[in-house]
Amino acid sequence: MESESEKPRHGIQSIEVGGRLLRVLAANSRPMMLRDLARNAAMPAAKAHRYLVSFVRMGLVEQDANTGRYDLGAFAMELGLASLARIDAVKLAAPVLEDLYEQIGETVALAMWANRGPTCVRWIEADGPITITLRTGVVLPLTTSATGRAFAAFYRSPSMKKQLDKELRAAAESEGCSPAEKQQAMECLLGEIRQHGIARADGSLTPGINGFSAPVFDHSGKMVAAITSLGPVGNFDNRWESSLAARIKAAAALLSSRLGFDTAAGKADDIPAEDPRVRRVRRSPAQPRKRAEKSPQEQTS
């Protein structure tokens, strides 16, 4: 007798067909015209349009009113982030980020590689006269952000290389230099980052905002995330040898070790003596911290 598990399961074919459109959008790094989207999904444009109307209503897809191009919508981002949140690295990172925030009192965040690039998946915002927030789901550039530079230096994947080449070509065109010159300058920067084990940005993305970002590795030695901290110039000591840099590296090493990576970089004695510019923060219940569940205005570095 055929068991329940062996019986063929009948699904809803129209959902499976429409899902092809979502797969095509997810696989592309930019919004698409209807004709291109339909062709890549192997269906007539009129049929694709009907599916897209429903997907737009659901928030899975959005259409640019000016260009008519389609892209993944807010609900698709929510689904993707919910899936990322189920990865052990994100869950294990929560207490590590909490502890790092208590040590340094600056905005801290966790980023992971998604289909568009380094993506913020969790953050804790510091209080202060200058608001520095990382909206959940924001994608950071590889060449100008500390987070992106960490991925450019330590993350190995064809998609990263493709995105990096794209950004370097755009920068070369904007600055009026050759792509080879930008590539050479980037290689020098990445070599420095690998030497120090941490990436930094000194206002290269947002003027007046410094940032550090350290790689997180899993049991196989693959980079799976980055721990980032941001702060205003003057308060945020971005010297390679600063206590701030050491604490961020130690937090990344601790998370790496909890993911099974063999490292001694997280030892407490690797952290230099207390720097007066690195403060330990204690807050009362009347001063709640802002977290990734909120979606404030975006200002990133």
Image (spheres, rainbow, N blue to C red):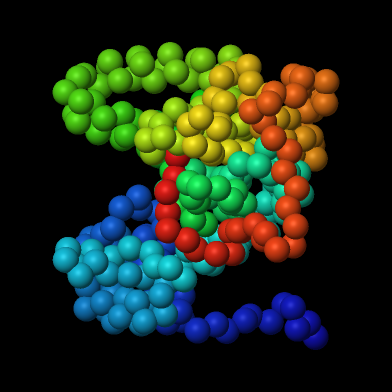
The quarter of the picture where the C terminus appears is: top left
In the foreground, 137 or 42: 137
Q: Nearer the viewer, residue 261 or 268?
A: 268
Q: Is residue 54 above or below residue 212?
A: below
Q: Residue at x 58, y 50 (%)?
A: 127
Q: Is residue 221 left or right of residue 54?
A: right
Residue 220 in picture, x, y percent from top left: 71, 33
Answer with the quarter of the image where residue 4 lies: bottom right
- At a point 45% along the width and 36% down the height, the residue shown is 209
Q: Please provide percent x and percent y for residue 15.
A: 45, 79
Q: How many marks?
A: 0
141 horizontally vs 271: left or right? left
Image point 36% across, 70% down: which residue? 61
Residue 252 appearing in the image: no
Residue 26, image x and y in percent?
41, 58
Residue at (30%, 53%) from the top-left corner? 30
Looking at the image, is 33 positioned above or below residue 278?
A: below
Answer with the quarter of the image where residue 167 lies: top left
Looking at the image, residue 276 sits to the left or right of residue 153; the answer is: right
Relative image position of residue 269 (x, y in whole percent): 83, 20
Judged left or right of residue 156, residue 246 is: right
Residue 80, compared with residue 151, is above or below; it is below
Q: Is residue 277 visible?
A: yes
